[in-house]
Amino acid sequence: MTTASGPAAGSCAVTYRVTGEWPGGFQGEVVVRNTGSTAVDGWTLRWTFPDGQRITSLWGGTVTQSGAEVSVAAAPYTATIPPSGAVSLGFTGSRAGTNTDPTVFLLNGAECSAA
């Protein structure tokens, strides 16, 4: 059984970027960096979409979404983020309005800095 170990507060950084857009949809990438000195195992990344976006497909993890709240659990092949390492997640999504980026990301409950 794998248990989640989280980063110390402030020891992660997240880069979020939209890599493509079309009417009613978009594609994006999230890169999670472990800036701490210990590995992060069995991680979950959470964020809130500000404008009604929904993830329709994700690779690099398992997504659940309730309203604007997004939660991504590590896939078996991305379960450990070593010190100074990173994990990249790609996704496609739908949107009803603008494509405002989320601003707060939590890795195992600890807030990450924006990279």
Image: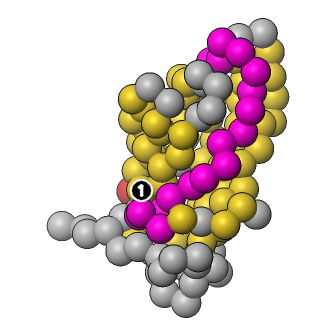
3 relative to 51 in the view: left or right? left
Whole-percent x, y for residue 77 in the image: 45, 58
Residue that carries the numbered disc 1 in the rendered image: 44
Q: In the image, what residue occupies the spot 47% across and 68% down?
A: 110
Tell me the element at label 1: strand
Q: Which of the pair 100/15 is nearer the observer?
A: 100
Whole-percent x, y for residue 57 in the image: 54, 28
Q: In the image, what residue occupies the spot 66% across and 42% down?
A: 102
How was the colour assigned to the protein in this rendering? secondary structure
Quadrant that contains the C terminus: bottom right
16 relative to 7 in the view: left or right? right
Magenta stretch containing residue 97, yes or no? yes
Q: Is residue 30 visible?
A: yes
Q: Which of the pair 58/52 is nearer the observer?
A: 52
Q: Label 1 amino acid?
A: Thr
Q: Main secondary structure of the magenta part?
A: loop
Q: In the image, what residue occupies the spot 54% across and 65% down?
A: 111
The residue sitting at the bottom extreme is 37
Quadrant that contains the N terminus: bottom left
109 in relation to 48, above or below: below
Whole-percent x, y for residue 44 in the image: 42, 56
Q: In the image, what residue occupies the spot 66% across and 12% down?
A: 96
Q: Based on the displayed image, in which of its 4 quarters is residue 36 positioned? A: bottom right
Magenta stretch containing residue 63, yes or no? no
Q: Is residue 74 visible?
A: no
Whole-percent x, y for residue 20 in the image: 81, 28
103 in relation to 13, above or below: above
112 in relation to 46, above or below: below
Q: Residues within 10 Å of mark 1 (few under 14, many from 20)?
A: many
Q: Which of the pair 61/33 is nearer the observer?
A: 33
- Range of residues picked out in magenta: 93-110
1 relative to 112 in the view: left or right? left
